[in-house]
Amino acid sequence: MAAGGHHALDEFTALDPASIALLLDVDGTIIDIGPSPFEVHVPEALCRSLERLLARTAGALALVSGRPIRDLDRLFSPLALPAIGGHGAEMRVTDGQFVAAAGPLPEKLRRQLAEAALGAPGIEIEDKGYSFALHFRKVPGQEARLREAVERARAAFPDEAVEILPGKAMFEVKRSGISKGSAVRKLMAVAPFAGRVPVFIGDDVTDESVFAVLPALRGKGYSVGGKFTGLAGSFAAPGEVREALKRLAG
């Protein structure tokens, strides 16, 4: 474990679950990055930790992911955790409270983006309706071509308020003004999250918007991989985060 990881592990596991809201990015944070978004593994031990922590925080635990909530439910089944999905495009506070914040992108725009993957085996497409992602983990040499294709698609729809969100070996086109950070602000205003200290763990540029709102919420941020500064600590890898969650869960 890296030196920073020792400090982060000790500080994190000393937190009081009764006073915090635990907010967790998924890919690259609590589960390891797979060959594609559709080839990942969720350890049973992680699900047990999350279930215990959901109880210990009185329900104030949420996944904060770029994935749609339906995919999170599939990955973590039988758990149906509170969640922010689609980088803030949708939110579920409890099993009976589902909020969709973004309308679908035009079908023609999504079709044009899908065409960028034609003739290039290894590119994975992910049509979420309200956003569209192109993953090139298996074919990193396609990055420049995909970037140009995504820019052309956006330029072809000048009246649509969309933006390109870069991630780990992916480009995602989504509605402007939607972010994980703005969704976290809304989540922290409702029970059972309101009045608690938000504690967020993330690993990627897509998590920067959450790190940015934490000071105003008097929260704590932890990164994975040491890519961000000014946070409470950093874990070296998702395996260390899983160990920290296990210890916090008791």
Image: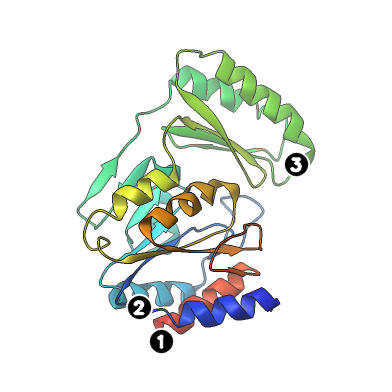
Q: Earlier in the sequence, mark 2 or mark 3?
A: 2
- Amino acid bearing label 2: Arg
Q: Is residue 78 above or below residue 109?
A: below
Mark 2 vs mark 3, CA separation in Å: 39 Å
Disc 1 designates what residue? 250
Evaluate whether residue 76 shows in this view.
yes
Q: Position of residue 227 (x, y in %)?
A: 66, 57
Q: Residue at x 36, y 46 (%)?
A: 183
Q: Position of residue 226 (x, y in %)?
A: 66, 63
Q: Secondary structure at mark 2?
A: helix
Measured Cα–Cα span from mark 1 to mark 2 = 8 Å
- Asked if residue 167 is positioned above or below residue 106 in the image, the reply reads below
SS at circle 3: loop
Residue that badge 3 annotates: 139
For image coordinates 57% across by 75% down, the residue present is 8
User: What kind of element bears circle 1?
Assistant: loop
Quadrant where the N terminus is found in the figure: bottom right
Q: Are marks 1 and 2 in contact (CB under 8 Å)?
A: yes
Task: Identify which amino acid the numbered label 3 is placed on.
Answer: Val
Rendered image quadrant of residue 101: top left
Callout 1 crowding tier (Cα within 10 Å): few <14, some 14–19, many ≥20? few
- The residue to which callout 2 is attached is 52
Q: Given the image, on which type of amino acid does mark 1 rest?
A: Gly
